[in-house]
Amino acid sequence: MKMILRWFPYGDDSVTLQQIRQTPGVTGVATMIPQIPVGEVWPAEQLIALRDEVNAAGLEMEVIESVNIHEDIKKGLPTRDRYIENYIKTMENLAKAGVKCLCYNFMPVLDWARNELDHPLPDGSTALSYRHEEVLKLDPSHFADAMLGGSRGYSLPGWEPERMGAMAADIEFYQSFTTEQYWANMKYFLDAVIPTAEKYDIHMGIHPDDPPWPLYGLPKVITCAENIRTFLSLNTSPYNGITLCTGSLGSNIHNDIPAIVREFADRIPFAHIRNIKHHSPQDFDEAAHLSSCGDLDMFEIVRAFYESGFDGYIRPDHGRMIWGEQARPGYGLYDRALGATYLEGLWEAIDKMEKRGK
């Protein structure tokens, strides 16, 4: 297992590589190039320079997040082949920079949704929050404005301004779209890119839908164990996997996260681990990583990864804003550093318990 943190380059992050390097147990970062429009090729020279910057700080850059899928691919339009070819070229360039894992998503239009990015919690911290009825009250244009307006001036992956103008029309497009069509378009993409992943030893991990239930009539497919089975059957290569996000899947109170980890462990190259606190089946706040702060049992989740022989990448996912920090929503330093050391502590304890019991 390798513990990493997400980091945004080019001054688009309040957290520095030097601060990440000082976080116990953290060996690398998951990063991206934020200013390249969705569907365009990520240049090799820019990726190599970024890797060199990360390496110079004593960290690894083996994971890339948010090489976003162009909407034409998701829709299955005739133009998708050009964008898929660009995606393959980007994967080839990622390999030149030593990338071993690519986290992406296939969520239509909205990569993720919250109605508040700085919801006050009882302890005085703030966190990302979701209230289903409040989200439904927002029309798409106002929803985009609310998300971008709460970003504190940082980019929000999945909410790029150039995509927002087409949001209403894109949502309308999917109203007559079937789930079967969406699965077919996912398979088309996978069959096109997985040979490149195999060739360059890049494990692909699709991120679950966030939240994992219908929203604005959009198809939601990576939501539960049954649908993960369907997704993995679309292309059975071991390089076709999932990014196991405990917070996204855990938003659905019916999902048994430790059981999902155990079932799909050999197809999980990357894990985002965070806790959430439900107020109803479809209303929740993101919480501190400690099990008692939310509804997810972090000990059982980490034990499921350990006992399944997980040897991929883990990052503490979204953190609260604590101790007066002002940062990108969900991505401050302090609470994520606490999360990383907490998860490392659980892993060490489970490791020692297992070894002493043998």
Image (cartoon, grey):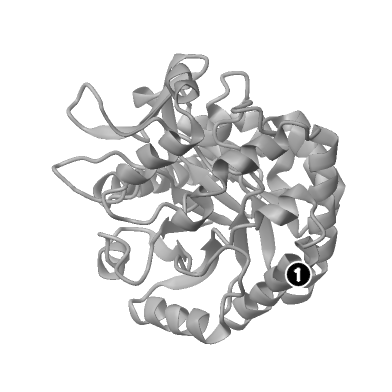
Q: Residue furthest left?
A: 324
Q: How many marks?
A: 1
List x then y, in percent, for residue 15. 27, 60
List x then y, in percent, for residue 264. 72, 41
Report the residue at 77% width, 62% height from top.
Answer: 79
Quarter placement of the C terminus: top right
Residue 92 occupies quadrant: bottom right
Under circle 1, the secondary element is: helix
Q: Is residue 92 left or right of residue 357?
A: right
Question: In front here: 12 or 278?
Answer: 12
Quarter placement of the N terminus: bottom right
Question: In front here: 135 or 207?
Answer: 135
List x then y, in percent, for residue 308. 66, 44
127 is higher (above) or lower (below) than 325: above
> What's the residue type where badge 1 is placed?
Arg
Question: In front here: 95 or 270?
Answer: 95
Can residue 284 be seen?
yes
Question: In front here: 75 or 101?
Answer: 75
Report the residue at 80% width, 37% height from top.
Answer: 229
Report the residue at 30% width, 59% height from top.
Answer: 23
Q: Residue furthest top?
A: 280
Residue 9 occupies quadrant: bottom left
19 is higher (above) or lower (below) than 301: below
278 is higher (above) or lower (below) than 85: above
List x then y, in percent, for residue 123. 19, 25
Q: Is residue 33 left or right of residue 232?
A: left
277 is higher (above) or lower (below) than 143: above
Residue 38 occupies quadrant: bottom right
- In the picture of the structure, the residue carrying the numbered disc 1 is 82
